[in-house]
């Protein structure tokens, strides 16, 4: 598992991460969310021993990364930039990684097939597409068959088919009992793959909860209404204290009144309804609203 405890990292006068504490556990996909500049990459680099914290700790299975024996067999990592030599073939890149990490050579063929790179294994790294380069980075992360995966924006460069493949791969890895810690700016995708969310902003923890609990706590529910007479209905709803907002497609978004009450009010006034439904904010909408609320408090 991954344990981050009171982690702090400063760059001169700028504090990138401050007092950050959370855990990513086996058997689950933990999504790591935050706006640009929130400290996600700094945190991942600290977990992988690439950045030395100014305070606190980041441990994998109880040890700092630098103390792990044969780390490639314990942690698979994908950070921005693969570091692969552009003149090597995809197969040779993985071969030297395997040899330098004490990993059996037959693993190379397995991860090439697992990541869909078998057909381009003899192609030079510099000639690979962005999506294939991303798959090669994932192949390198999986080379040691590690129980822990740390992946920073792994969907970058992948097409729709590749994103679906990655989603299934991450779910499979977690189902096998591995710890999967992944950051992504694609909220819709994260909502389909993550079991738990760790959300940070400006280097501080905002939320750490199972996905369902996060949405239950922070997602806003509203009633969506469509009617041939939106003006009169909006006026009636506002008269009884509801908050009403016009949507771009001609509907009304109503907060502060349940759908049943909206329906009864419309019926009492003789106003026809074409649609009446309750809608809960998506993960992306919830995430953005939470950050906006925090920024408003700061202001």
Image (cartoon, grey):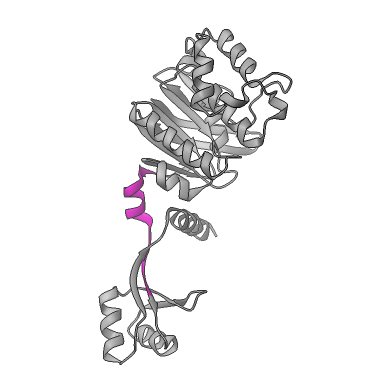
Locate residue 37, reporting x and y percent: 60, 43
In which quadrant of the rendered view does residue 259 lie? bottom left
- Point out the residue furthest to the front here: 119
Residue at 61% x, 22% y is: 121
Whether the magenta-drawn stretch holds residue 211 is answered as yes
Locate residue 240, reporting x and y percent: 32, 84
From the viewer's side, name the closer residue of 279 and 63: 279
Which quadrant holds the C terminus?
Answer: bottom right
Locate residue 242, reporting x and y percent: 36, 78
Residue at 74% x, 20% y is: 87
Whether the magenta-drawn stretch holds residue 155 is answered as no
119 left or right of 86 in image: left
Which quadrant holds the N terminus?
Answer: top left
From the viewer's side, name the closer residue of 271 and 239: 271
Residue 139 position (above or below residue 108): below
Regarding residue 68, the answer to whether it shows in the image is yes
In which quadrant of the rendered view does residue 126 lie? top right
Q: Which residues are magenta?
A: 207-224
Residue at 59% x, 38% y is: 15
Residue 9 position (above or below residue 265): above
202 left or right of 128 in image: left
Total labels: the figure holds 0
Regarding residue 184, the answer to whether it shows in the image is no
Residue 58 position (above or below residue 72): below
78 left or right of 234 in image: right
From the viewer's side, name the closer residue of 144 and 16: 144
In which quadrant of the rendered view does residue 147 lie? top left
Locate residue 174, reporting x and y percent: 37, 31
4 left or right of 109 in image: left
């Amino acid at each position: 598992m991954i344990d981050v405890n009171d982690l702090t990292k400063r760059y001169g006068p700028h504090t990138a991460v401050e007092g950050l504490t959370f855990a990513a556990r086996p058997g689950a996909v933990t999504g790591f969310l935050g706006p640009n500049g929130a400290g996600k990459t700094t945190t991942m680099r600290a977990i992988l021993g690439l950045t030395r914290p100014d305070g606190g700790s980041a441990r994998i299975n109880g040890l700092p990364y630098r103390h792990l024996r044969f780390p490639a067999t314990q942690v698979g990592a994908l950070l921005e930039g693969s570091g692969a030599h552009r003149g090597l073939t995809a197969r040779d890149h993985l071969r030297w990684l395997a040899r330098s990490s004490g990993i059996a050579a037959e693993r190379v063929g397995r991860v090439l097939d697992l990541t869909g790179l078998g057909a381009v294994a003899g192609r030079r790294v510099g000639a690979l597409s962005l999506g294939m380069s991303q798959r090669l980075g994932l192949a390198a992360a999986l080379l040691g068959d590690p129980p822990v995966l740390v992946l920073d924006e792994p969907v970058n460069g992948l097409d729709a088919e590749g994103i679906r493949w990655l989603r299934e791969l991450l779910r499979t890895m977690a189902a096998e009992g591995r710890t999967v810690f992944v950051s992504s700016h694609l909220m819709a995708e994260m909502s389909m793959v993550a079991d738990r969310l760790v959300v940070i902003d400006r280097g501080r923890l905002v939320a750490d909860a199972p996905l369902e609990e996060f949405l239950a706590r922070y997602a806003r529910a509203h009633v969506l209404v469509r009617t041939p007479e939106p003006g009169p209905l909006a006026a009636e709803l506002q008269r009884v204290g509801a908050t009403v907002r016009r949507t771009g497609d001609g509907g009304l978004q109503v907060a502060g009144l349940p759908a049943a009450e909206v329906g009864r009010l419309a019926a009492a006034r003789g106003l026809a309804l074409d649609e009446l439904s309750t809608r809960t904010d998506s993960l992306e909408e919830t995430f953005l609203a939470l950050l906006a609320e925090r920024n408003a408090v700061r202001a």
